[in-house]
């Protein structure tokens, strides 16, 4: 036979009794009112801009980071820069000697020589043909050889372009035979060399990473936004960023995107803030404090000082007059800028206690416990 649950029932009764006691109206004497130094406010509709305080880690802007690699295989003959050096676009980072490039260049020069001969022969025969000295069949043969030489030259030139050589570099080949098989590995941007993965004498294969060059004029601040705060976040809002390396100086950024998957462990969503770094004082890996402007909302608001908590319930004291106050249970939103949104529990234009709440709460609890 099951025994009756006497103890839990007794606890429930006590809890209900306490809540009924706390729900009673509070009455203060004139002397207690004078000592309490209470001030009041009216429940009113206000516009509130949420500010989220978050931690962030600075990272490089992935749209401005470059992995520099040769498009031909070769041996590193000269290392021109090392890590942490600032470089300009087009600056030579390293020189390679490439057998495959040298062969392609030699084939191009051979095709160029054949083309020049075919062009000169075509010009000569064309004049003779027009004068009726040579047969048309001879002219057609020479013209065909010229077009074939031109096509071969164009194909050889395209191959050199695919190795990264510019038009000017290709055009200088015939005048600089000592540059055959030499490949200049250059920087694609103005930036900072953040990684060097090669050394002189090393043999590189095509596509193998040699340098990492980053443009740090802009950075990303990666923040973790709690799921509960997501309704207050909107892409495009402004962010204020502080770092220990620049005390007293703040940086401005914009929330550019939100992740698509919530972290199951922390229940947060990653946000990406893009910020300018014109002086180059910020570096990837730095920790930062972020103040993120939330969504502007409008609704009933009360001063944050007016709200107090008992157990898991928020309350405000409604002013009834003649030293009488009513503790009213309210459902609230997230506080922002010293104001708390009221979801339910009290109507607009009600007068509430805005300061001195702690002392009033102690009187309420004392009277309720009598």
Image (spheres, rainbow, N blue to C red):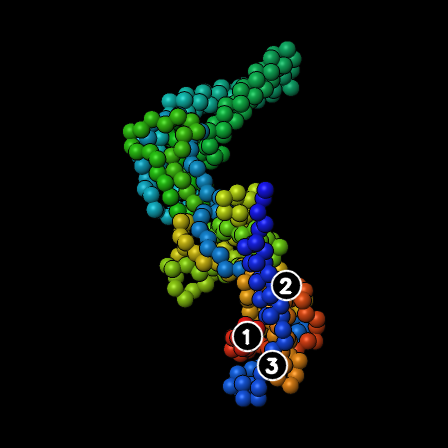
Q: Quadrant of residue 101?
A: top left
Quarter of the image for the C terminus: give it.
Answer: bottom right
Of the residues under marks 2 and 1, which one precedes in the sequence?
Answer: 2
Q: Residue at x 65, y 13 (%)?
A: 136
Quarter of the image for the N terminus: give it.
Answer: top right
Q: Residue at x 57, y 73 (%)?
A: 368
Pointer 3 local density, CA inside 10 Å: few below 14, some 14–19, many at least 20: some
Of the residues under marks 3 and 2, which one precedes in the sequence?
Answer: 3
Q: Quadrant of residue 90?
A: top left
Q: Residue at x 53, y 75 (%)?
A: 366
Residue indicated by mark 2: 331
In front: 17, or 236?
Answer: 17
In front: 253, or 162?
Answer: 253
Q: CA distance from mark 2 to mark 1?
A: 27 Å
Do labels 3 and 2 touch, CB within 8 Å?
A: no
Seen in the picture, residue 271 relative to 121 is either above or below; the reply is below
Residue 354 visible in this rendered orientation of the protein: yes
Residue indicated by mark 1: 370
In front: 120, or 58?
Answer: 58
Pointer 1 local density, CA inside 10 Å: few below 14, some 14–19, many at least 20: few
Q: Residue at x 39, y 64 (%)?
A: 247
Q: CA distance from mark 1 to mark 3?
A: 13 Å
Q: Residue 28: percent from the left, percent from the top? A: 58, 83
Q: Nearer the viewer, mark 1 or mark 3?
A: 1
Do labels 1 and 3 touch, CB within 8 Å?
A: no
Q: Nearer the viewer, mark 3 or mark 2?
A: 3
């Amino acid at each position: 036979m099951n025994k009756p649950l006497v103890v839990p029932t007794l606890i429930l009764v006590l809890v209900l009794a306490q809540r009924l006691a706390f729900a009673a109206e509070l009455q203060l004497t004139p002397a207690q009112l004078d000592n309490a130094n209470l001030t009041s406010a009216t429940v009113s509709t206000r516009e509130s801009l949420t500010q989220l305080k978050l931690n962030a880690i600075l990272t490089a802007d992935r749209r401005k980071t470059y992995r520099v690699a040769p498009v031909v295989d070769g041996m590193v003959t000269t290392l021109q820069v090392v890590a942490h050096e600032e470089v300009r676009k087009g600056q030579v980072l390293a020189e390679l000697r490439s057998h495959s490039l040298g062969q392609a260049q030699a084939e191009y020069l051979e095709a160029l020589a054949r083309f020049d001969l075919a062009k000169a022969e075509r010009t000569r025969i064309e004049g003779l043909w027009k004068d009726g000295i040579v047969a048309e069949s001879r002219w057609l043969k020479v013209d065909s050889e010229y077009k074939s030489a031109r096509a071969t030259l164009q194909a050889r030139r395209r191959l050199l372009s695919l190795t990264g050589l510019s038009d000017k570099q290709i055009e200088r080949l015939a005048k600089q035979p000592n540059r055959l098989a030499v490949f200049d590995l250059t920087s694609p941007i103005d930036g900072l060399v953040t990684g060097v993965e090669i050394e002189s004498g090393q043999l590189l294969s095509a596509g193998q990473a040699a340098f990492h060059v980053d443009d740090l004029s802009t950075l990303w601040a990666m923040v973790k936004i709690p799921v509960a705060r997501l309704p207050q976040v909107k892409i495009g809002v402004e962010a204020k960023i502080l770092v220990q390396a620049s005390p007293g100086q703040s940086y401005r950024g914009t929330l550019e995107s939100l992740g698509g998957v919530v972290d199951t462990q922390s229940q947060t969503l990653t946000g990406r803030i893009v910020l300018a770094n014109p002086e180059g004082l910020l570096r990837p890996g730095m920790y930062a404090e972020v103040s993120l402007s939330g969504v502007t909302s409008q609704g009933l608001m009360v001063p944050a000082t007016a709200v107090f908590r008992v157990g898991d319930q928020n309350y405000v004291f409604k002013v009834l007059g003649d030293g009488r106050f009513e503790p009213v249970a309210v459902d609230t939103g997230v506080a922002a800028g010293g104001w708390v949104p009221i979801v339910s529990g009290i109507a607009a234009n009600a007068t509430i206690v805005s300061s001195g709440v702690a002392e009033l709460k102690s009187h309420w609890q004392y009277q309720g416990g009598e």
